[in-house]
Image: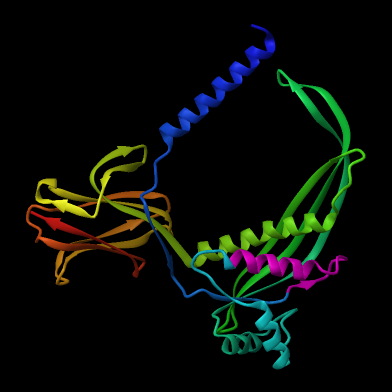
Amino acid sequence: MDEEAAGILIAVAVVVAVVLALFLLLIPEPSERAVIATERLDVAVLAFGNSSAWSSVGETLRARVETKLVNTEGISVFSRVRLDALLTEQALSQTGALDPSTAVRIGSLTGVNKLVAGSVYGVEALSEAVTICERWKDGICVQSTPGTRYTVKLLAQVEVLNAQTGRIEQAHDEEGTANATAKQGEVFAGYDTLIAAAADDIASDVSSFLTLTYTREIRYGLYRAVKAKGDGFVGEGETTRFHRSDAKAYLIVHFARVRDDDSFDLTWVDSSGAFLSSLQDVVASDDWRLYSLDLEKAPLGRITAKGRIAGIDAFAKAFVLSP
């Protein structure tokens, strides 16, 4: 066996070992997902200020933030086209420092409860000579060519304002980075493309801190049997129909994203709304919990497991109990 073939076999073996290790450690998520807004998230993205030398970067960042938020579950976004027309009609400024009264006025006109505002204060565009490897053998580069790496760093400040009070609830310094490498003689697509990619980087951060601050995420499912795996549980026989012979209905809950020391309340109710069982728990992010209901004395018919996180309705999972 030559060295190249041996190297390939070793690489394949390493990949198989990594995949196997991940499989053994990975805990599959329960099938049901709930994203719970702790506050209503109706958002308007205001025009971004721009003190950089790149004239259109503020609008690029604004558009990317809006697009990202539109595609984020639990967030409703007021169209920036409608917003701009409305503010022009009302002769209201939306860039620069936003005073509380103007923020409240915008909230009143649009019906949103959060405003996202900000400013780009720097764009760094860099290029550097690099060597690009075109062919590898046994982990060693055996053929290379000169090239250029182009990098853009986008620096911005982003704020979230309460549109009912005008108060700034969050303020973040954000940095987005993007780069591209071209071989010598290849045409570089231009920094505008990298600026857009760096803006996407910041937009993802904006979506993340809105989601982390104002929503929770829970995964859950009902099963006939459960086995422990790592720090969590794996359900077997997921169902919405149980029989007396099942003895117990198992509910797996994965608190994928909550706040530390959040309260969790679980109640099991029958078709008339009467309480069969209830409990209170304290949870944190990435906690797994296993709950169950004894079916031997439960009434036949429809039964619902209702979960509340931090006092807010999170899910209602129903099943039917038959003889």
Q: Nearer the viewer, residue 70 or 310?
A: 70
The residue under the point 72% across, 76% down is 47
Residue 198 image position (x, y, % from top left)? 73, 56
Q: Relative to 10, say whether 289 is above or below.
A: below
Q: Relative to 114, say whether 229 is above or below.
A: above
Magenta-drawn segment: 48-69
Task: Answer left or right for 213 relative to 304.
Answer: right
- Colour theme: rainbow
Residue 136 image position (x, y, % from top left)? 75, 23
Q: Is residue 95 magenta?
A: no
Which residue is outermost to the right?
A: 185
Q: Nearer the viewer, residue 118 or 197?
A: 197
The residue under the point 76% across, 61% down is 155
Task: Answer left or right for 132 relative to 72.
Answer: right
Residue 21 image position (x, y, % from top left)? 46, 29
Q: Nearer the viewer, residue 38 or 141?
A: 141
Occupied quadrant, residue 114: bottom right
Occupied quadrant, residue 140: top right
The residue under the point 68% across, 56% down is 201
Residue 278 image position (x, y, % from top left)? 20, 62
* Quadrant in which the N terminus is drawn: top right
Q: Relative to 246, say whether 275 is above or below.
A: below
Occupied quadrant, residue 171: bottom right
* Quadrant in which the C terminus is drawn: bottom left
The residue under the point 46% across, 28% down is 20
Task: Answer left or right for 245 relative to 63.
Answer: left
Counting labels gives: 0
Which residue is outermost to the top?
A: 1
Which residue is outermost to the bottom?
A: 90
Q: Is residue 52 magenta?
A: yes
